[in-house]
Amino acid sequence: MSSEVTRAENEYSKKTHTHTIANITNLQETLNMKSAVGHTHSISEITDLNVSLEKKADKEWVASVLVKKADKEYVDEKDNEIIERAEWYHEWTSKILKTKADTGWVSGCLDLKADKTYVNDELDNKADKNHTHKSFTTVRADDIILNFDLGSSAPLENPSTSVKDTLNNLDNSCRNIESHARNFEAYELPAMLDKKADKTELQTLKTEILQTLYPAGSIYTSMNSTRPEVVLGFGEWKQIVDKFLYCARYSKTAGGSKKIKEANLPPHTHTGTTNTTGSHSHSITKRGYRNLAAGSDRQGMDRYDISSDPVDSNAGIFCGTAGNHSHTFTTNPTGLGKDYMPPYMTVYAWYRIA
């Protein structure tokens, strides 16, 4: 409200202002549009006015936004112009496309065409259609290939044989070669093929030879670990592992040991000593006396009467034979029984079991 009042004060005249005649002419009309000086507004009207003013947009803001907007009529005019141009361009494009060839069709046609550079190079190698030779002394027809007969226009001078005659002779030779080739294909070739071995027959023969060389019970050795049934293509084989081949009276008999046992030792002797155990005693007998027990004093010998007792000098003292005995002894063990192998080279070996 304050801004409106300020604006009114600035626009409406003050007491000391004056008007020109032109301004006074419309004065009554202007006054008729003004409200009475003593008119009043109710509180409710003022409140409604405030509410209504709050809903209004600021004039300056609206003006600044409207400046950024395009004029509706201008926009409609431009839209129509763009639509017309688009329709024209579409119509023009359609006409152009109708005059253009289909891409796939063009590609197909180009594939059927010869390369321009290639054609020019080939044409440069060809003779002019209307060219002629007035004379020549030598004709080489080795590389000439004819699909039809040509009339002879060669001179009667050298060469004495015309091009046509030369080519006819060559043609006859070719026909002879063709006849020989047909005869070879019909007769000689089958006879030669009959003398050739069939591939399957050769393979069968090879297998039969190997079967003969390696019957059941034969041994197969190799430095490779590939099993013989894979190499040879037949048979069942059992591998021989950690065994030497020993030629004996009977086969498949295993024996021997990697360690030396007593039976494998050469003949040899041992020396030994015994201790002093085995002490003993003997009884002594004197003729004419009773036996003197072992360990007894000699004074305890008791003499008995013998009718024909000679003098004492003829009497002897005898030692009994009791106390016979023997000694046994053992020697300390020697040798460790280590592995004993002669120089060798390992191989893979199998024998055929079926």
Image (spheres, rainbow, N blue to C red):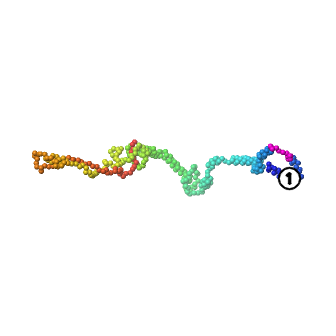
Residue 63 image point, x, y percent: 77, 50
> Does 40 lie within the magenta span?
yes
Q: Is residue 214 visible?
A: no
Could you tell me what secondary structure mostly forms the magenta stretch?
A: loop
Relative to 109, is 274 on the left or the right? left
> Does 280 lie within the magenta span?
no
Residue at position x 58%, y 51% in the image: 150
| Residue picked out by circle 1 | 14
Residue 315 image point, x, y percent: 13, 49
Relative to 343, is 325 on the left or the right? left
Q: Mark 1 is on which residue type? A: Lys
Q: Residue furthest left?
A: 308
Residue 77 image point, x, y percent: 76, 48
Residue at position x 35%, y 49% in the image: 259
Pick whichever, 83 or 8, lies toward us: 8
Pick whichever, 192 or 276, lies toward us: 276
Relative to 260, is 106 on the left or the right? right
Q: Is residue 6 visible?
A: yes
- Numbered-mark total: 1
Give the residues drawn in magenta, as a range. 34-45
Which secondary structure lies at badge 1? Answer: loop
Residue at position x 16%, y 47% in the image: 301
Pick whichever, 40 or 51, lies toward us: 40
Q: Say which quadrant the C terminus sits in.
A: top left
At label 1, counting other C-alpha atoms closer than 10 Å, the crowd grade (few under 14, some 14-19, many 20 or more) is few
Residue 7 image point, x, y percent: 81, 51
Pick whichever, 241 or 247, lies toward us: 241
